[in-house]
Every structure is written in C-alpha cells, then in structure tokens.
Amino acid sequence: MNILLSVDGVLRNDTGELIPDGLIIYRAMQVLGRVVLVTEEDRTHVEVWLMLHNLADYDDLIDSTVCVDPEENVRFRQLSVARSKGGIAIYIDSNPSYVAEGLRRGITSLLFSCPEYSRPEYRPDAPTGIRKWDDLVAERTRQQVLRAADVRMKKDEGSYFE
C-alpha cells in the first residue's frame, strides 16, 4: 500500500521547521505501508532536510523534476507519477486544492490542517485583503442598527433576563 505524503506543509512549515503533528502522522503511516514523500523543491535540498530531522527512512521521494511542462501543476503531475508506480491508498497534504484534486482522481485524501503551522491562505476563514475603513464603519453601523432594533436588548423586557 502506497501512502503519498507531502513534505511541505505536513512535515515542515514555511520556515523549514519540523511540524510535530506531521511527524506523528508520518510515523503512523510507516507502520501501515510504503511511504512516498512528495515535494515541490529540489530533491537534494529535501533529502538533506530529511536526514537532519532523522526522517531518512522513507520509501520513495518524488520531487519537482518529474514535471517537464512548465504549464503543468507540479503536484498534479506528482500524483500521476505516484499512481503510475502503484496504487495510492492515502494522499496527505496541507493544501486544500491538492487534496481536492486527489479526491477528483478517486484517491482517498486527507487534509492536514494544523492551526499553528498551516498557511493563512489555505484556511477557509482567510482574509481576502485589507478592508477599507469606510467598509469597517459601515459594518459597525449596520450591527448597531440591528442591535438597537433587537427587543431582547430593551430594559423593559425583563422576561429575557430572568
């Protein structure tokens, strides 16, 4: 059984630190089957990082060199290459778009989302940009109007506060 696990976002964060929860998943998956790591970085750099963190016991590593077309998404190509080397039982990644692609291809996929290490743009509540001051004032005014019209906020309605 091949288990495809992303190095980036599951085992390490953007600054290169090891993610402890990702390490737990990695070790658990090693017991279940053949662990294939995927990364969008250079193979040599990732291999050094894995050795420095005592993670050199993986079964295979698929890096960005499998993608020859610059227009093609590297991770989507890696999914195809991994599938050509044998069936993928589980695909684990921190990027929701990649997990969705795995699901679209019929691969059981697991979204790894650790609040301390996940990238802000991957979160469903991610801010889309800086709100304008006028928008903030308008929203505050809207909420004040709604609150003023709420009968539960009036003092003469004692039944709500009993």
Image: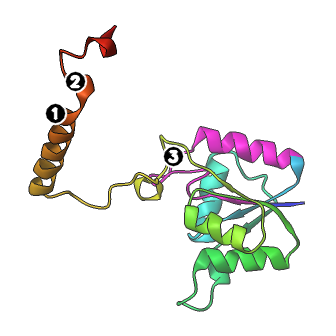
Kind of residue indicated by mark 2: Met
Q: Which residue is mark 3?
A: 17
Which numbered disc, 1 or 2, marks the residue that appears first in the sequence?
1
Label 1 SS? helix
| Image vertical order of residue 90 relative to residue 82, above or below | above
Res 62 visible: no
Q: Quadrant of residue 152?
A: top left
For the record, the magenta segment spans 4-31
State the separation of the CA atoms marked 1 and 2: 7 Å
| Mark 3 residue crowding within 10 angstroms, few (<14) / some (14–19) / many (20+) | few
Kind of residue indicated by mark 1: Ala
Q: Residue at x 59, y 92 (%)?
A: 69
In the displayed structure, does residue 127 sit left or right of residue 5?
left
Frontmost residue, 63 versus 120 = 120
Q: Residue at x 34, y 7 (%)?
A: 162
Picture coordinates of residue 29, whole percent (x, y): 80, 48
Q: Which residue is mark 2?
A: 153
Q: Which residue is mark 1?
A: 148
